[in-house]
Each structure stands twice: as C-alpha cells, then as structure tokens.
C-alpha cells in the first residue's frame, strides 16, 4: 500500500466507541463478563471451555493483581466496526443459525432461532472482538495490553470456522493502521497449536504485516493457500515437548523481530499446546506455557515494540489457571503491570505451579 493510500485509509475511518480514553489508574487488561458463553449447556458440546475467560479473571483477583475497578471493560464491536474487515455478505450469513452452528461446531444451534444464537453465542464473541480492538490501542499507549479473550485466528474477512466467527486479529491491526499515526507495520506471533489461517488469508498480499506461525503440522486447518502469507513458518510434529518447543519459540521470535521492526506485535497465546489437549496434539507442560509467554514478552521488550496478547485456543479446564499464572509471572518479571520496566525479580514459573497444585488446582494432564 502506498503512502497516499494509507493516508486516505485513515481519513475514511468511521466513528467508533472502541477507542476510548482509559484512566491511567487502569491496567491495560481488557475483559467483560459478557465474554462467557452459557446457553442451556449447549456450549458443553464443544471441547472449548466457554467460561474460561471469567475463570482467568477470578484467579487474578484471588491473587490481588486486579480488581473490577482497575481493568478495562470491553465493549461489543458494532456492525460498522466489523465492516472494517468483514464483508456485508459474511455478516448477513451469520444471521442463519446453520452457519453459526457450522462455525462454532455446535450442531444443535441450527435448530434455535437466530435471535437467541445472536444473543447467547455471537454477542459474547463480538464483545471479545471489541476487546481485542480496544487492547490494540491500549498496547500502543501503554507498551503492552492483554485481552483476556479473543484470538479468533481461523476467521477471515469472508469466512469463519474453528469456533472463530469474527476476525479480531485482523480488525485490531486494520483499526491501528486506519486510526493511529505512526502505526504502519505489524507482526503477528501466532503460537496457538493450530495454523492461523484466518489472519493469514486477510494479509496474504499485505507487506505491512509479518506473520510468524508455530503450529502442529498435522491438525486443522491445514490451509495450504493461507500458508503463503507466513513469513516465518515453524511446523511441529505430534507430541513436541518443552525443550524443543521453547528453543524454537525463542529462536524464531528473535529472528522475526530482527528481520523487520514492527510498530505493534499481536501475540496469539493459545494454550491448546498443553499436554493432553484433545485438539492440539502437542505435549507442552504448564511451566512451558508460562515460560513461552515470558520469552515472547521479553523479546518485545528487548526490541522496544508494544505487544498485544490474546488468549485464543485452549481446550482443557486447567487452561484458565495456567493463563492466570502466566500473567502473574509476567507481572513478577516486570514485563506487565504498573511497575513494568522496573527491576526484574526471579522467575515465578516453578513457584506459581507449586502454588496452584497446593491450592487444589491440579496441573497434571487430564
């Protein structure tokens, strides 16, 4: 895209309620109780824990890291917000319950009236999408941000799938490109166990976006066309364990940031890499996940690049505890929180895991 086109893009921005002023007393952690999906037990028909986001917040409150007053409440993305990326035709298709049932992989949804599907399933996903867009701006303002939800990396502008109905990663980047001066390049570091074919299709021919994707080569979606967008592709074998995985994450995160200097990093921090995950097929320990997140945040800090983290996939009940432990470790390391940038203390990876087990939150595989 030329400079003239980029300037024109910024001038054409619609009015949005997602780029709000956030008090300095608030941490750039975005969440809403509306994230959680609960609908007559139908959400249990998919292996995804549809209430994990609220559980993460609960654990962070227990550790007295956050309160309701010092985090940012997510707002639902409007249709006009979504049209920044999505086609009108695609959004209209979501008004058919059959389409939503296919995307979310919850077949009984096709028998329900769409107004209920919109309210109980799509509204939570739109709110998480709004949260990712909001967190993108916060990351630029504060140097880091975490959306406790989001990471719908299988959805592109005109197609959903894999429980991903809205392209929140693409939207966050496009919003920044349109609205924030000085943001013209982005790097996506996608460490979910699955290939991020949605954002890859959206940015296939966009040189402004550099994509690093580390995933199990043998599982969904296996989208060969989308792989053409990946600048740094790391394909893993079944059962990959901590040592090999963490070495590759560190090597390639550094390599990606040395290869191009972005204005923002979008970090898709899926926990479906956890050993025992029914869909991920990898064998990473809870400690390995915490260390992985630390590696990525340290790389962002070393290179002086703002980072936005979204939580993406994770299909075991224990993933909420691991996400919370990881955020707490990032805080202890001085990588997030009000004291980010202060003296770094010893890693909490072993400590956090021991505490979880002693508190009755088992961390062995299911």
Image: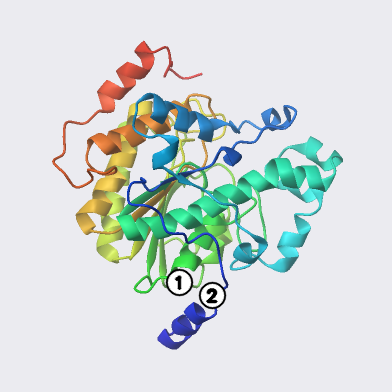
Please determine whether, in this image, residue 65 is positioned above or below residue 259: above
Element class at badge 1: helix
Residue 224 horizontal/vertical position (percent): 56, 58
Within 10 Å of disc 2 (Cα), the crowding (few <14, some 14-19, many 20+) is few
Residue at (44%, 83%) from the top-left corner?
Answer: 7
Residue 13: mark in rendering = 2
Quarter of image, res 225: bottom right
Within 10 Å of disc 1 (Cα), the crowding (few <14, some 14-19, many 20+) is some
Q: CA distance from mark 1 to mark 2?
A: 7 Å
Q: Nearer the viewer, residue 257 or 167?
A: 167
Residue 179: mark in rendering = 1
Element class at badge 2: loop
Quarter of image, res 261: bottom left
Which badge, 1 or 2, comes first in the chain's sequence?
2
* Left/right of residue 176 with respect to residue 81 in the rendered view: left
Residue 308 horizontal/vertical position (percent): 39, 52
């Amino acid at each position: 895209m030329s400079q003239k086109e980029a300037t024109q893009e910024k001038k054409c921005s619609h009015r949005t309620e997602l780029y709000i002023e956030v008090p300095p007393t608030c941490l750039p952690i975005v969440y809403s109780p509306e994230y959680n999906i609960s609908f007559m037990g139908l959400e249990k028909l998919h292996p995804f824990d549809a209430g994990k986001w609220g559980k993460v917040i609960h654990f962070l409150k227990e550790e007295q890291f956050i309160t309701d007053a010092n985090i940012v409440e997510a707002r639902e993305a409007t249709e006009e917000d979504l049209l920044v990326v999505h086609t009108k035709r695609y959004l209209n298709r979501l008004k058919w319950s059959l389409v939503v049932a296919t995307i979310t992989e919850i077949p009984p949804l096709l028998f329900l009236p769409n107004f209920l599907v919109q309210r109980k399933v799509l509204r939570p996903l739109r709110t998480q999408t709004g949260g990712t867009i909001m967190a993108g701006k916060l990351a630029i303002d504060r140097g880091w941000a975490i959306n406790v939800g989001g990471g719908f990396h299988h959805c592109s502008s005109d197609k959903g799938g894999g429980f991903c109905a809205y392209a929140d990663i693409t939207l966050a980047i496009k919003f920044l490109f349109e609205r924030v001066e000085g943001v013209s390049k982005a790097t996506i570091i996608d460490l979910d166990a699955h290939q991020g074919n949605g954002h890859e299709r959206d940015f296939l021919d966009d040189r402004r976006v550099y994509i690093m994707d580390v995933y199990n080569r043998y599982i969904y979606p296996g989208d060969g066309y989308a792989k053409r967008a990946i600048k740094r592709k790391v394909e893993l074998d079944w059962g990959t364990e901590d040592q090999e995985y963490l070495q590759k994450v560190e090597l390639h995160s550094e390599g990606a940031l040395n290869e191009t200097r972005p204005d923002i990093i979008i970090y898709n921090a899926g926990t479906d890499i956890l050993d025992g995950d029914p869909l991920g097929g990898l064998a990473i320990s809870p400690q390995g996940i915490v260390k992985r997140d630390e590696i990525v945040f340290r790389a962002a800090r070393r290179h002086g690049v703002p980072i936005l983290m979204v939580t993406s996939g994770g299909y075991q009940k224990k993933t909420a505890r691991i996400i919370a432990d990881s955020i707490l470790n990032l805080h202890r390391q001085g990588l997030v929180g009000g004291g980010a940038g202060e003296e770094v203390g010893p890693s909490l990876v072993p400590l956090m895991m021991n505490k979880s087990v002693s508190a009755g939150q088992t961390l062995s595989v299911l």
